[in-house]
Image (tube, rainbow, N blue to C red):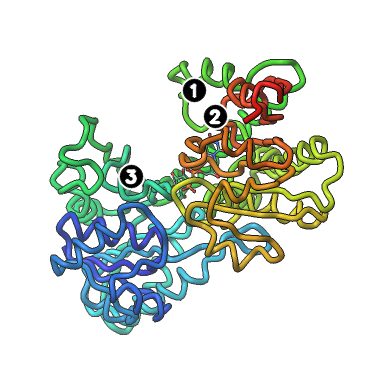
Amino acid sequence: MRLAVVGCGYVGLVTGSCLAEAGHEVIATDVDSARIGMLNVGRLPIYEPGLDRVMESASAAGRLRFTSDCAEAARVADAIFICVGTPPLDSGEADLSAIDNVARQIASAARSAKLVIEKSTVPAQTGEQLRHALQIYGRSNGAAFRVASNPEFLREGTAVGDFFHPDRIVVGVEDPESERQLREIYQPFLEGRFHCPVHEPKCPPAPGPVFLVTTIASAELIKHASNSFLGLKISYANVIADLCERLGGNVEEVTRAMGLDPRIGPHFLNAGLGFGGFCLPKDIQAFIRLAGKHGVDFGLLKEVEAVNKHRIEQFVEKVRRALWVVKEKTVGVLGLAFKPNTDDIRFAPAIDVVRRLIAEGARLRVSDPVAIERARSVLKGVEFVEDAYHVARGADALLLLTEWREYRELDWKRIHREMGRPLLLDGRNILAPAKMKELGFEYHSFGRPELSANPVLVSS
Ligand code: UGA
């Protein structure tokens, strides 16, 4: 099918590239012509593992192309995915101006029937507004528009794999023809008819995705409800971690046992610095505002948000307690991205921690496997260093703020030798307290018993 993808951010690029790789003809468009220029010479504006290969393969097969002309994309496609950003306004509500803008462009450019699909995360009832805008602005050119909602559940860092192997494909529709078209679009994924770019030579056996047909309002709600629930699980685990600290429990033991109950499940119960990124925090805020606007007080989610925000202060307080005086101390930071395998630092807890410590007069030396370039534009007055061992050199404290695999695998004995004071604060609970103690670190994390270090054990 001929498809258009409007918005070449992370969701649009993954969606467009994967749909093209699976056999559709895709034209992707963005208002940012510099971005389109980059894409046209095969350069990706974001870091997403595996996306470069999919994009290259789909482009080489002649099924994926990029243009800054949204009208052209809208004219040639049978179905158009809207993947533009919906950033938070000061009120916490989602800013839908990009969606409105795209709707007007599609409406005036289209000359034949189109299925217009919301892929961006939007509040419930956006579908209705979208249909209305398409009808009004397209009234003079005779094109009929159908609207659908098809929320994405892609995780940054594993988005390509998630696209090819989704648990569920949710389509919110209001007529059988839209459902038929969306089934056709996703047929390769439903039937496993694609060359998987993630698993070589063969994908592990797994049940295929559930294709779920709902109303548009339900589909819109499913996205917000899912992301908010993930945030709720994390904040819950974090409060349990606080309790463990007070009562002498171990949050890992508690959440592991909880997760063995299939009704709870093991995922998203890792305690630490809390959730960040451009999805969970803003979606929770938007969901609270949406509920409030419609007379439902979502106090539960307000608490999830409050618990999450408070993680930063709790962590900084741990740093203060351990360092005694923060001012003029050299503090090394490992990890800036909001999570591993991405260079995304938007709403990253690590960035908040660094800013707080700068404000308290510490000397910050920071690092990340891929996010340094992005961080340069938002963090001033810090030293950026590529090498993790260099970060530790002479430092009074080392903070682990993103759960990168690379950091688990560091030579911690060497790090210990490099540091001025072997003080390690693990904001992501990724290292084993007993091992760190054995290596001679003074080690602090969240919700796990504090073991005092024995520096005599490590001398060289
Ligand atoms: C999230 C959802 O997981 C996706 O399903 C959704 O499609 C996406 O938002 C979106 O709306 O586009 P993402 O923002 O990529 O995906 O990040 P997550 O993997 O959800 O992680 C969010 C944050 O939670 C990270 O900062 C991570 O470090 C933190 N986290 C995660 C924890 O603190 N504890 C955990 O147990 C899990």
Q: Are marks 2 and 3 in contact (CB under 8 Å)?
A: no
For the residue with label 3, is its CB less than 8 Å from the closest atom of ligand 1? yes
Labels 2 & 1 near each other (Cβ < 8 A): yes
Three-letter residue code for mark 2: Leu
Classify 10 Å Cα crowding around label 1: few (below 14), some (14-19), many (20 and above). Answer: few
Q: Nearer the viewer, residue 102 or 153?
A: 153
Can residue 62 be seen at all in this image of the molecule? yes
Residue located 13% across and 45% down the image: 193
Where does residue 210 sit, x and y in percent of width and height?
A: 28, 37
**At numbered mark 3, what does the secondary structure look like: helix, strand or loop?**
helix
Q: Position of residue 29 (x, y in %)?
A: 33, 73
* Circle 1 SS class: loop
Which badge, 2 or 3, comes first in the chain's sequence? 3
Residue assigned mark 1: 264
Distance of label 3 from label 1 (alpha carbons): 22 Å
Q: Quadrant of the N terminus?
A: bottom left
Residue 397 placed where, x, y %?
A: 71, 42
Frontmost residue, 224 versus 69: 69
Q: Which residue corresponds to mark 2?
A: 269
Query: Which is in the foreground here, disc 3 or disc 1?
Result: 3
